[in-house]
Image (tube, rainbow, N blue to C red):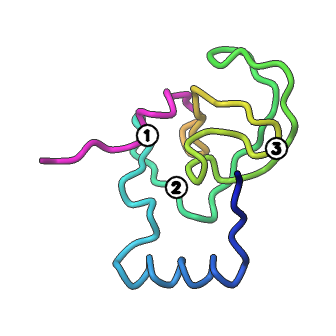
Amino acid sequence: MAYKISPEVEEILKELVKDAGGDGFERIRCPLCRWQPTAESRWCCASSGEPENFDGGCYTVWNTFETRGRCPGCNHQWRWTICPRCHGWSLHNDWYEKNAS
Protein backbone atom coordinates (compact mmCIF):
# COMPACT_ATOMS: atom_id res chain seq x y z
CA MET A 1 0.00 0.00 0.00
CA ALA A 2 1.39 3.44 -0.92
CA TYR A 3 0.67 6.64 0.94
CA LYS A 4 0.67 10.11 -0.57
CA ILE A 5 1.39 13.09 1.65
CA SER A 6 -0.80 16.10 0.97
CA PRO A 7 0.92 19.42 0.16
CA GLU A 8 -0.37 20.83 3.45
CA VAL A 9 1.16 18.01 5.50
CA GLU A 10 4.40 18.27 3.51
CA GLU A 11 4.67 21.98 4.41
CA ILE A 12 4.08 21.21 8.09
CA LEU A 13 6.79 18.55 8.00
CA LYS A 14 9.23 20.98 6.34
CA GLU A 15 8.57 23.53 9.08
CA LEU A 16 9.13 20.91 11.78
CA VAL A 17 12.44 19.91 10.22
CA LYS A 18 13.53 23.57 10.04
CA ASP A 19 12.57 24.02 13.70
CA ALA A 20 14.71 20.99 14.53
CA GLY A 21 17.71 22.75 13.00
CA GLY A 22 18.08 21.49 9.45
CA ASP A 23 16.55 20.52 6.16
CA GLY A 24 17.49 16.85 6.35
CA PHE A 25 20.39 17.28 3.94
CA GLU A 26 23.10 18.38 6.38
CA ARG A 27 24.69 14.90 6.41
CA ILE A 28 24.68 14.44 2.63
CA ARG A 29 27.78 15.51 0.66
CA CYS A 30 29.56 14.71 -2.58
CA PRO A 31 32.36 12.31 -1.60
CA LEU A 32 34.64 13.94 -4.19
CA CYS A 33 34.27 17.70 -3.65
CA ARG A 34 32.13 17.85 -0.46
CA TRP A 35 29.35 19.85 -2.19
CA GLN A 36 26.13 19.65 -0.19
CA PRO A 37 22.71 19.38 -1.88
CA THR A 38 19.65 21.18 -0.59
CA ALA A 39 15.98 20.26 -0.72
CA GLU A 40 15.76 22.31 -3.94
CA SER A 41 18.56 20.38 -5.73
CA ARG A 42 17.38 18.33 -8.71
CA TRP A 43 18.60 15.44 -10.86
CA CYS A 44 17.16 14.02 -14.07
CA CYS A 45 16.57 10.35 -14.87
CA ALA A 46 18.31 10.08 -18.24
CA SER A 47 20.12 7.28 -20.01
CA SER A 48 23.82 7.28 -19.13
CA GLY A 49 26.99 5.42 -19.93
CA GLU A 50 29.72 4.64 -17.42
CA PRO A 51 29.50 4.08 -14.56
CA GLU A 52 25.71 3.51 -14.29
CA ASN A 53 25.26 2.01 -17.78
CA PHE A 54 21.54 2.73 -17.80
CA ASP A 55 19.59 2.84 -21.05
CA GLY A 56 15.98 3.88 -20.64
CA GLY A 57 15.77 7.08 -18.63
CA CYS A 58 12.27 8.51 -18.20
CA TYR A 59 13.39 12.17 -17.80
CA THR A 60 11.73 12.60 -14.42
CA VAL A 61 13.29 15.50 -12.50
CA TRP A 62 13.45 15.09 -8.71
CA ASN A 63 15.72 15.27 -5.69
CA THR A 64 17.50 11.93 -5.67
CA PHE A 65 18.16 12.14 -1.92
CA GLU A 66 14.45 12.27 -1.11
CA THR A 67 14.13 8.73 -2.51
CA ARG A 68 17.60 7.32 -1.74
CA GLY A 69 18.33 7.21 -5.47
CA ARG A 70 15.12 5.60 -6.73
CA CYS A 71 13.47 7.41 -9.65
CA PRO A 72 9.81 8.09 -8.84
CA GLY A 73 8.97 8.03 -12.56
CA CYS A 74 10.29 4.65 -13.70
CA ASN A 75 11.42 3.09 -10.39
CA HIS A 76 15.05 2.72 -11.54
CA GLN A 77 17.37 2.42 -8.54
CA TRP A 78 20.39 4.60 -9.27
CA ARG A 79 23.58 3.11 -7.85
CA TRP A 80 25.62 6.14 -8.93
CA THR A 81 24.93 9.87 -8.49
CA ILE A 82 26.59 12.70 -10.39
CA CYS A 83 27.62 15.86 -8.57
CA PRO A 84 26.27 19.07 -10.14
CA ARG A 85 29.35 20.93 -8.90
CA CYS A 86 32.35 18.73 -9.82
CA HIS A 87 30.53 16.50 -12.38
CA GLY A 88 32.07 13.41 -10.81
CA TRP A 89 30.13 10.18 -10.31
CA SER A 90 30.08 8.49 -6.89
CA LEU A 91 28.15 5.57 -5.48
CA HIS A 92 24.87 6.97 -4.19
CA ASN A 93 25.33 5.45 -0.73
CA ASP A 94 28.75 7.13 -0.40
CA TRP A 95 27.04 10.54 -0.33
CA TYR A 96 25.56 9.83 3.12
CA GLU A 97 28.00 10.75 5.88
CA LYS A 98 28.53 8.08 8.48
CA ASN A 99 27.79 8.85 12.13
CA ALA A 100 30.77 10.35 13.94
CA SER A 101 30.22 8.11 16.98
Residue 24 found in image quarter: bottom left
Residue drawn at (39%, 72%), measured in percent from left and top? 22
Circle 3 or circle 1, nearest the eye = 3
Q: Which mark is residue 95?
A: 1
Which amino acid type is marked by label 3?
Gly
Residue drawn at (16%, 47%), measured in percent from left and top? 100
Q: In the drawing, does residue 49 fall left or right of residue 82?
A: right
Q: In the drawing, does residue 1 fall left or right of residue 88?
A: right
| Residue range highlighted in magenta | 88-101
User: Are discs 3 and 1 less than 8 Å apart at CB?
Assistant: no
Q: Farthest left residue? A: 101
Coordinates of residue 37 in the picture (x, y in percent) = 52, 55
Local secondary structure at mark 2: loop
Coordinates of residue 90 in the picture (x, y in percent) = 50, 28
Q: Which mark is residue 82?
A: none
**Among the two numbered marks 3 and 1 on one chain, the one whose residue lies closer to the N terminus:** 3
Say if the magenta span includes residue 98: yes
Which amino acid type is marked by label 1?
Trp
